Amino acid sequence: MQLRHGQVRLRSASCESAPSNDPASSKYQWLVMPPCRLPPRRFTQRHRIGQRRILSLGSSVLAVHGRSSSTSPSSANRSATMVSRQSLANKAHYEILAEAWRSGRELPPEVSEWSVLTAEPGGVDYVEANLGDKTALWVRPKLAAEDRVMLYLHGGGYVGGSIWTHRKMVGHIAKAIGCYALLATYDYSFQSKFPRQIEQAVTAFEWLAEQGIRPEQIIGAGDSAGAGLIIAAAMKLRDIGRPLPAAILSISGWHDLSASGLSYEANREKDVFFQKATVDMLASQVLAGADPRHPFASPIFADLKGLPPIYLQAGEDETLLDDSRALADRAKADGLEVRLDVFPGMLHSFQMMAGRAPEADEAIERFAQWVRPKLGLTGTTATRGEGQEVA
């Protein structure tokens, strides 16, 4: 059923969970994870990020290993150590989850709810679609170009997250770009193992082609595990000779399931949830004995030649920071157009605070400005409620 602009079709469940005859069994966003003992949090002197320290140049241009990208004027005077009050909600969310996990305590949905971090974008319709054996969600901003589509895969460590946890954030991104989005999902680690999730991501790209959307009118995007899947799916499409999307966005991408980055140690006091022991456990659940350095599991070890332009965003304080750095290094070495933006003081997937925290809104606006020309979109964005032209 077609919905009017701004209407939302919601169900009582916040995410797709384990198969069950009890509809209430799927109401929790974070699935029950195997027991894992997190190390106690120790408050010591803050670490520098080794020799790969992030520099804040004169006009707040972020440079990492010689790569640079300019920021929007609104952030030109922002200190590298100052964050907005609104952005602290993301940190508090992860601290609550980490403490609950340590203690084995189950949190009520109103406390653990992931999607409450995000404001409603407004002027966006959400319509369900059948994609294979999964339910996908069309995200349709008012005034957006219907034939330009962002395929988005949500994060959640292969144990949580869904089209419902991420629908508002994806609505903000699609609205800023001025395109439609298809928010797709994939098997959790208890449902199937690597590389099944990559196959499902490839199927989503192929499904869009069957709907008449040309590859050059599609971009791939995702956060955390979803970002890793988008990269792996693009590699698979390349290897089987299929057309590739116009560009890729990675938000706090999980691109190294071997967890080899130095940022796990450098940021362990600041990122209390994504400790190395936690990430190792999550990786083992989906890999089920497969090599964590397999190129499709960890694209930082892959040959990326021939892939489309990649834009990576990461938080300076997250333990997965080096995943994005390493992928940017690999992409640059393989001759790709690549951009890496590291946001001071931010944690994992901080873009989930879209519409509430200025850092999230700025990150989304940066991506929109970067990707619109690659989709042939010109003029003003739908974010401003104005028209646009399609080149």
Image (tube, rainbow, N blue to C red):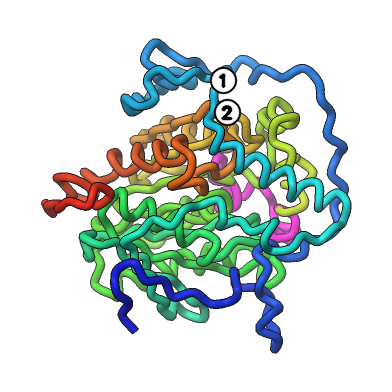
Looking at the rendering, in which quadrant would you find the N terminus? Answer: bottom left
Q: Which amino acid does label 1 sit on?
A: Thr
Residue 291 on the magenta span? yes
Q: Is residue 137 visible?
A: yes
Rendering quarter of residue 71: top left
* Residue bounds of the magenta highlight: 283-301
Q: Is residue 235 visible?
A: no
Q: What residue appears at the point 28 percent right and 39 percent down from the top-left corner?
A: 369
Q: Which of 137 and 27 is in front in this view?
A: 27
From this view, report whether residue 311 is shown above or below residue 123: above
| Residue 265 located left or right of residue 184 | right
Residue 27 x, y percent position in the rendering:
66, 72
Residue tagged by mark 1? 81
Q: For the residue carrying disc 2, how many other residues have a C-alpha within 10 Å: few (<14), some (14-19), or many (20+)?
A: many
Q: What residue appears at the point 34 percent right and 63 percent down from the top-left corner?
A: 124
Element under disc 2: loop
Residue tagged by mark 2? 345
Residue 129 x, y percent position in the rendering:
41, 78
Residue 342 x, y percent position in the rendering:
49, 29
Please give the count of numbered marks on the rendered protein: 2
Measure the alpha-carbon separation of dots 2 and 1: 6 Å
Q: What residue appears at the point 74 percent right and 31 percent down from the top-left corner?
A: 268
Q: What residue type is labelled 2?
A: Gly
